[in-house]
Amino acid sequence: MPHFNPVPVSNKKFVFDDFILNMDGSLLRSEKKVNIPPKEYAVLVILLEAAGEIVSKNTLLDQVWGDAEVNEESLTRCIYALRRILSEDKEHRYIETLYGQGYRFNRPVVVVSPPAPQPTTHTLAILPFQMQDQVQSESLHYSIVKGLSQYAPFGLSVLPVTITKNCRSVKDILELMDQLRPDYYISGQMIPDGNDNIVQIEIVRVKGYHLLHHESIKLIEHQPASLLQNKIANLLLRCIPGLRWDTKQISELNSIDSTMVYLRGKHELNQYTPYSLQQALKLLTQCVNMSPNSIAPYCALAECYLSMAQMGIFDKQNAMIKAKEHAIKATELDHNNPQALGLLGLINTIHSEYIVGSLLFKQANLLSPISADIKYYYGWNLFMAGQLEEALQTINECLKLDPTRAAAGITKLWITYYHTGIDDAIRLGDELRSQHLQDNPILLSMQVMFLSLKGKHELARKLTKEISTQEITGLIAVNLLYAEYCQNSERALPTIREFLESEQRIDNNPGLLPLVLVAHGEAIAEKMWNKFKNEDNIWFKRWKQDPRLIKLR
């Protein structure tokens, strides 16, 4: 691999926390220059470019040190030095180590830059893989070509099977490259490994026949070819500059001021509490007004509205309208933006537009196969649809990519309660509190409710005191009132009835059904249940799975 050599981009800056990294090699913190050596600078740029994604040690060694004889110890020292430069501590971790995988920059990153020029199309030849079974080789070759051909709108042109299927010898390969002159080619060999297979893949740039990447991928028995296709797609993203299905979680805005407002808004959104979401709404609305041609604020605003509706602190119907408006605006700016497509997929499936939603999710996943945002939206979608096992698996994939995502952790807690029961939910809640969500009021209110359902009233009351009064609204208030009923039975009913009477549009909020059932009885709750069911209420699908409503099913 060639040495890392960043091309200067006019006015391009990476912004995170109070740092600004310029493409001229300078690093500023609170407007004061911070010394950063060339190797540390190069590693930091690569991590920032891949913000939200794992960068393997081999990739860093190849791109920063090139052909120099170095080992992982050099990289480890470089990462250690970079952490000291960024003044990392336990409370402020910038670089996450994923043992056996590599490193990831785990703080929000924004790029301030002028519009980038449109990239050119890259032509790729996929050669038949060497396998013991010729028929299987032809079938796999066809599947991979067909799968990667879906990326044609995004800058990748794949030569058809009819041209490459007989290209097996060195002579055949050289003749094909000479006649058609593709930019790159992929070759592979499948080696049996017990019941599984090891696939050895090489990505080669035809000009100079330069090997860009070599990787061995283990395929478990009966895994579909689409998994191998997705892995190859990710490798192409890393090896071929300019491809347009960009998986980076980097937001581009046009000024430092709008960038700072956006970062504050994203921070509040990620805190995922009633108060923080209200703050996020204000900041992100301000950011949209400051940078009306930037995609990221529209996507964040759409997610904010959906989150507030889910939390019961914004009218659900209006929230859906607002979320859809902002997601559509993002796609108008870039119709291939994966986050916007994922949001529209979620909105459409909530509205029971399953075919449209499925197509949008499929396109979003093609554009960004490894994205915590897309995993979260899709897991949320599966949860709402009642596909609890699949939802749990997808949310786990999201949390593997972004362990600090509060909304995903809380969604996992609800799924666990619905799917495997209250004991598992309490254990998971304790685990989440010991990690990243120790002060989150939604998590605390859920734990209070679970403990109260189990009769652990003293512990529940103790946890209740940790919840700030300014956060007791919407779903948090509902959880705490239900816990009060578990603790005090009939004595809690007047307070619950008063709360229900004060709620606007109670007939449009299935999240209140558990309280209606205990406060007004089975007959009235069943009447509301049937109303939601007959109206195909978009939020009813989520709440009808609640174990507390088993009498009404």
Image (spheres, grey):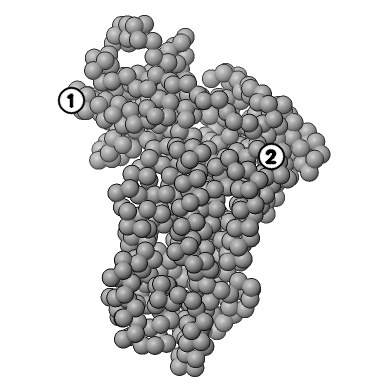
Q: Of the numbered discs in the image, which one, if any, rests on residue 135? A: 1
Q: Position of residue 313 (x, y in %)?
A: 53, 68
Q: Position of residue 492 (x, y in %)?
A: 49, 89
Let me know if residue 394 appears in the view.
no
Sequence-first disc among 2 and 1: 1
Residue 147 location, quadrant: top left
Q: Looking at the picture, which amino acid does disc 1 mark?
A: Val
Residue drawn at point x = 36 percent, y = 88 percent: 521
Q: Looking at the picture, which amino acid does disc 2 mark?
A: Ser
Q: Is residue 29 above or below residue 113?
A: below
Cα separation, mark 2 vs mark 1, equals 56 Å
The residue furthest left is 135
Residue drawn at point x = 35 percent, y = 82 percent: 525
Residue drawn at point x = 50 percent, y = 45 percent: 329
* Within-10-Å neighbours for mark 1: few <14, some 14–19, many 20+: few
Q: Nearer the viewer, residue 514 or 46?
A: 514
Q: Which residue is mark 2?
A: 255
Residue drawn at point x = 35 percent, y = 42 percent: 362
Q: Is residue 477 above or below residue 273?
A: below
